Image (spheres, helix red, strand yellow):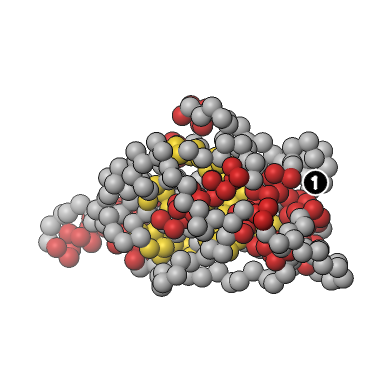
């Protein structure tokens, strides 16, 4: 049915039910979830809660990472995706300070976090929907702060040698890169850190610290010019759907083997020309947790109120580091013997 005929049918139905012609009241329902959430400019004025799952949910009461801090800069500001659960924003600030301590320039460049009310996005990510995921560039913050324009235009730098199959480029990758990723994995509230399989392999071969931390570092497509930090559901967040725990140990054999087969990189099968192509079903608001409709409808907080620590709080940021653990100080264990038989695992989803 065309949208015109659908509109006509709805108007006719409304006329039958109400006895008068009224404008359609369900126009909102026709929009996809990513259109609805992508259109929100500010967070809801309510308690901060992750609602649903990382790849199917939304969030209330988000706060923004300030665009500039002493040890971070938010990138691609026009995307308006620097919103997250306060626990994540607080963690990112902590991480940015620890990054400097491990030698990562003058701090971190932060990519996408979430939209102001979370939810699915028009482009870019399957997850990042509940305010507990954040992307960090594999490029340190330069000493001279980037302008807004530079933050829009600066290209990504891949850590891979694209002339080889799944191989980290030693001209780009350094021990500091390793320490940065492992620093992210070291926080107890971080459940997963996503990196390219080549980077995970590199870490497996070179990391001499706590091998259990490597289990949190998960191989995934892409993620060769940035990595992705995922927090566990915060304590007491009953509306947050937990993800299964990562396997024990470093998961350097079983979890990695499949990525180094042909299967993950094979082109998708050609569609059958005799069959009508099936249009992928769009995620609608009704597919998300019920509370997400209320999140969309809730009044907005103004940006200044909703900026973590206050928008002007970062002229001088005191370093509170009670929870800080410098990765260099973590006890070093010998790497385990590789006696596992590699077995391909099902394709993981981010
Ligand atoms: Zn990401």
Query: Looking at the image, which is closer to me, 342 or 337?
Result: 337
Q: Residues within 10 Å of mark 1 (few under 14, many from 20)?
A: some
Question: Residue 176: percent from the left, percent from the top?
Answer: 70, 44
The quarter of the picture where the C terminus appears is bottom right
In the picture provided, is 99 more to the left or to the right than 202? left
Residue at the spot x=81%, y=55% of the render? 205
Q: Is mark 1 within 8 Å of ligand 1?
A: no
Numbered disc total: 1
Q: Give the secondary structure at mark 1.
A: loop
Residue at the spot x=27%, y=55% of the render? 45
The quarter of the picture where the N terminus appears is bottom left
In the picture provided, is 77 more to the left or to the right than 195? left
Question: Residue 307: percent from the left, percent from the top?
Answer: 35, 46
Residue at the spot x=14%, y=63% of the render? 18
The answer to whether residue 54 shows anywhere in this view is: yes
* Residue bearing the label numbered 1: 167
As drawn, the residue found furthest toward the left would be 19
Please identify the quarter of the rendering in which residue 162 is found: top right
Query: Looking at the image, which is closer to me, 181 or 300?
Result: 181
Question: Residue 140: percent from the left, percent from the top?
Answer: 61, 37
Query: Looking at the image, which is closer to me, 234 or 131?
Result: 234
Question: Residue 71: percent from the left, percent from the top?
Answer: 51, 40
Please identify the quarter of the rendering in which residue 138 is found: top right
The answer to whether residue 40 shows anywhere in this view is: no
Query: Looking at the image, which is closer to me, 302 or 288?
Result: 302
Residue at the spot x=69%, y=57% of the render? 219
């Amino acid at each position: 049915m065309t949208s015109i005929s659908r509109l006509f049918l709805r108007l006719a139905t409304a006329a039958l039910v109400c006895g008068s012609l009224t404008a359609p009241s369900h126009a909102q329902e026709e929009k996809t979830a990513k259109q609805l959430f992508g259109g929100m400019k500010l967070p809801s004025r309510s308690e901060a809660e992750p609602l649903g799952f990382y790849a199917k949910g939304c969030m209330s009461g988000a706060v923004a990472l300030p665009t500039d801090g002493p040890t971070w800069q938010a990138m691609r500001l026009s995307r308006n995706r620097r919103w997250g659960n306060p626990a994540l924003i607080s963690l990112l600030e902590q991480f940015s300070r620890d990054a400097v301590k491990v030698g990562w320039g003058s701090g971190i460049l932060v990519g996408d976090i979430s939209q102001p009310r979370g939810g699915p996005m028009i482009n870019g990510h399957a997850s990042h929907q509940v305010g507990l995921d954040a992307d960090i560039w594999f490029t340190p913050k330069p000493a001279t702060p980037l302008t807004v324009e530079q933050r829009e235009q600066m290209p990504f730098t891949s850590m891979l040698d694209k002339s080889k199959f799944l191989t980290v480029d030693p001209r780009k990758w350094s021990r500091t890169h390793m320490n940065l990723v492992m620093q992210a994995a070291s926080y107890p509230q971080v459940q997963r850190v996503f990196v390219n399989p080549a980077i995970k392999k590199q870490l497996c071969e070179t990391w001499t610290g706590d091998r259990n931390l490597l289990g949190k570092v998960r191989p995934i497509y892409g993620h060769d010019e940035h990595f992705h930090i995922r927090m566990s559901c915060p304590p007491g967040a009953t509306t947050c759907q937990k993800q299964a725990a990562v396997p024990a140990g470093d998961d350097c054999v079983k979890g990695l083997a499949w990525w180094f087969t042909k299967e993950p990189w094979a082109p998708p099968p050609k569609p059958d020309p005799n069959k009508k192509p099936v249009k992928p079903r769009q995620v609608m608001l009704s597919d998300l947790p019920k509370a997400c409709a209320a999140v969309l409808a809730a009044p907005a907080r103004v940006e200044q109120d909703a900026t973590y620590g206050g928008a002007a709080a970062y002229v001088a940021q005191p370093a509170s580091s009670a929870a800080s653990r410098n990765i260099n100080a973590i006890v070093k264990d010998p790497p385990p013997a590789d006696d596992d038989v590699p077995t391909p695992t099902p394709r993981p989803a981010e």
